[in-house]
C-alpha cells in the first residue's frame, strides 16, 4: 500500500505530531531507510547515541518505534511515511534487518492465532440452554436499566431542566449506570449532553426532544417482540447492541458501486477511538456509513480521504432505512467526476424520510449546495440560497480554514446533522477544497 499526503495526515494523532514529523524530513537524519512489499523501515538519529528503530507494516498500517513516545503513531513513524512519499528514491530494497523481520513475524503469528481461535469458536457446538439463559439475564438487566432511565427522565421534567445547566457534568452518573445495564448506545447519547448545554442557546428545547426519543426507546423495547424485524434491528442498534459482522456480510443487503468519500469524523471517547466515514453511491446516490472502533489508538484497517472515489462492495446492516454498512472487498481507487448536487428541498425531503423510518439514527448526512459561512454575534451559521440560516458546530480553527478556502464564494458543504446543528466535514466546488482535521 502506498501512502499519499492525505493518508498520512489522517493517520496523525494530532497536529503537533504532524508538525514535529515534518521537522525530521532530512534524509541525513536517517542512516538507514528501506522498504519492500510488506513494510517500510528506517533508523532515525535522535539526541541519544543509538538511533531509533522505526517500522511500518503496510497491511495495517501498523507502527512500531523504539522511542519513548506514547503517541501512536509517533513523530518518527509519521516522518518515515512522509520521507517515503517525498523521497522514495532514498529507500533501498535490501532485505529487511532482523528487528523488522521479527516484528513482522510476530504480527503474523498473532493474526494466525486469532484466526485459529475464531475457527475453533465457530466450530464448537453451541450450548443453546446456556446462551438462552445469558440472553434472558441480559434482557432483564436492560429492562431494569431502562426503567431507571425512565424514572430519571420523569424527575427532570417534574423539577425543570434549568437546574441541569448549573451541574458540571449533567447526566454522567446516569451514563455510567447505563453502561452497567448493557445500554452503551444510551450512555453515548447522555455523554453528549454537557457539550449540548454549553454550545446551544436553545439547549432546553433540543434536550426535551432528546428526552422524548429516549422515552420512545423505553416504550419500544418493552414491546420489542411485537415489532417488525427491521425496526427491532434499529432499536437494538440505538441501544448499542450491534449484530455480528459475519451475519451482516452473509445476510445483509449487498450493493456494489463507485462510492464518493464525502467526509469523515474521528474522535476519542475514554480511550476508544471512533471513526465515521460517510459515502455516497454514484448510481443510486445512496448514503452509506462505515463505523469503526479501535481501543487505545486511532489505527483502522483502511484509510479514507475525502473527495476520493472508490470502487467497492458494501453489505448494509438490517434496518428500516439502512445507513450503516460493512466493506465486503478491498476498496479500489477510480477516477470519477463530481456530479451536480441536489437542491436543499430534495435533501431535506430525503432526511425527513430517513428520520421517519428510523428516528434513532444519529447523526444524519446532509449535503448543502452553494452555501456561505456567516457569523452572527458569537455564533456561526451556514446561509443557503433558499434563505435558511443553519447553526454550525465547528471549532474556531476549522471555521476560519473553511472560510479561507471558500474565498467568500459559495461552497457545497457535506455535514452531519444532529441536535439541530450541522458539523461540516468537507467542502468543495469543482474539486474538494477542505476536510475536517480530526
Image (spheres, rainbow, N blue to C red):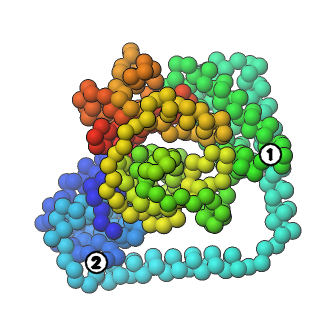
| Extreme residue in the front direction | 283
Task: Say which of 423 and 40 sits in front.
Answer: 423
How far across and down, in percent of the image, does residue 378 sit? 40, 18
Task: Say which of 51 and 411 sits in front.
Answer: 411
Q: Is residue 435 visible?
A: yes
Residue at image x 73%, y 46%?
Answer: 231
Mark whose residue sits in front, 1 or 2: 1
Left or right of 103? Residue 119 is right
Left or right of 238? Residue 223 is right
From the image, tell me which residue sits under label 1. Answer: 227
How far across and down, in percent of the image, does residue 357 sit? 66, 39
Q: Quadrant of residue 242?
A: bottom right
Q: Earlier in the sequence, mark 1 or mark 2?
A: 2
Q: Quadrant of the N terminus?
A: bottom left
Q: Quadrant of residue 397?
A: top left
Left or right of 313? Residue 131 is right
Residue at image x 46%, y 24%?
Answer: 391
Number of marks present in the image shown: 2
- In the image, residue 224 above or below residue 333: above
Element under label 2?
A: loop
Estimate the spatial distance between the alpha carbons at disc 1 and disc 2, rounded to whole Å: 54 Å
Residue at image x 41%, y 45%?
Answer: 263
Q: Quadrant of the C terminus?
A: top left
Residue at image x 18%, y 61%?
Answer: 86
How far across and down, in percent of the image, does residue 85 sit? 22, 62
From the image, tell me which residue sits under label 2. Answer: 36
Element under label 1?
A: loop
| Extreme residue in the left direction | 28
Amino acid at each position: 500500500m502506498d501512502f499519499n499526503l492525505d493518508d498520512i495526515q489522517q493517520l496523525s494523532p494530532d497536529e503537533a505530531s504532524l508538525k514535529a514529523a515534518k521537522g525530521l524530513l532530512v534524509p541525513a537524519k536517517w542512516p538507514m531507510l528501506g522498504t519492500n512489499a510488506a513494510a517500510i523501515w528506517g533508523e532515525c538519529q535522535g539526541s541519544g547515541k543509538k538511533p531509533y528503530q522505526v517500522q511500518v507494516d503496510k497491511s495495517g498500517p501498523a507502527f512500531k518505534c523504539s522511542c519513548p513516545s506514547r503517541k501512536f503513531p509517533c513523530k518518527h513513524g509519521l516522518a518515515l511515511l512522509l520521507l517515503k512519499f517525498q523521497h522514495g528514491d532514498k529507500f533501498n530494497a535490501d532485505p529487511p534487518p532482523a528487528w523488522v523481520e521479527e516484528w513482522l513475524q510476530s504480527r503474523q503469528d498473532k493474526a494466525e492465532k486469532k484466526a485459529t481461535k475464531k475457527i475453533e469458536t465457530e466450530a464448537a457446538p453451541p450450548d443453546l440452554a446456556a446462551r438462552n439463559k445469558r440472553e434472558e439475564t441480559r434482557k432483564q438487566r436492560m429492562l431494569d436499566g431502562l426503567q431507571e432511565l425512565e424514572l430519571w427522565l420523569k424527575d427532570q421534567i417534574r423539577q425543570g431542566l434549568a437546574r441541569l445547566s448549573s451541574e458540571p457534568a449533567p447526566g454522567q452518573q446516569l451514563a455510567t449506570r447505563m453502561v452497567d445495564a448493557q445500554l452503551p448506545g444510551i450512555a453515548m447519547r447522555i455523554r453528549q449532553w454537557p457539550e449540548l448545554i454549553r454550545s446551544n442557546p436553545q439547549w432546553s428545547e433540543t434536550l426535551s426532544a432528546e428526552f422524548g426519543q429516549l422515552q420512545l426507546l423505553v416504550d419500544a423495547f418493552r414491546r420489542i417482540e411485537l415489532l417488525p424485524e427491521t425496526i427491532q434491528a434499529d432499536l437494538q442498534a440505538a441501544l448499542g447492541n450491534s449484530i455480528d459482522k459475519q451475519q451482516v456480510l452473509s445476510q445483509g443487503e449487498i450493493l456494489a458501486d463507485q462510492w464518493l468519500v464525502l467526509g469523515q469524523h474521528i474522535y476519542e471517547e475514554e480511550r476508544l477511538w471512533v471513526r465515521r466515514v460517510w459515502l455516497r453511491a454514484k448510481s443510486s446516490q445512496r448514503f452509506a456509513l462505515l463505523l469503526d472502533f479501535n481501543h487505545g489508538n486511532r489505527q483502522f484497517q483502511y484509510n479514507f480521504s475525502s473527495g476520493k472515489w472508490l470502487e467497492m462492495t458494501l453489505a448494509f446492516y438490517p434496518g428500516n432505512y439502512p445507513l450503516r454498512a460493512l466493506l465486503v472487498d478491498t476498496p479500489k481507487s477510480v477516477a470519477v467526476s463530481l456530479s451536480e448536487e441536489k437542491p436543499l428541498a430534495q435533501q431535506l425531503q430525503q432526511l425527513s424520510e430517513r428520520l421517519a423510518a428510523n428516528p434513532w439514527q444519529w447523526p444524519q448526512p446532509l449535503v448543502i449546495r452553494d452555501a456561505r459561512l456567516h457569523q452572527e454575534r458569537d455564533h456561526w451559521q451556514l446561509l443557503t440560497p433558499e434563505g435558511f440560516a443553519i447553526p454550525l458546530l465547528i471549532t474556531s480553527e476549522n471555521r476560519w480554514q473553511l472560510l479561507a478556502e471558500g474565498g467568500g464564494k459559495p461552497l457545497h458543504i457535506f455535514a452531519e446533522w444532529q441536535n439541530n446543528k450541522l458539523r461540516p466535514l468537507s467542502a468543495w466546488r469543482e474539486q474538494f477544497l477542505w476536510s475536517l482535521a480530526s
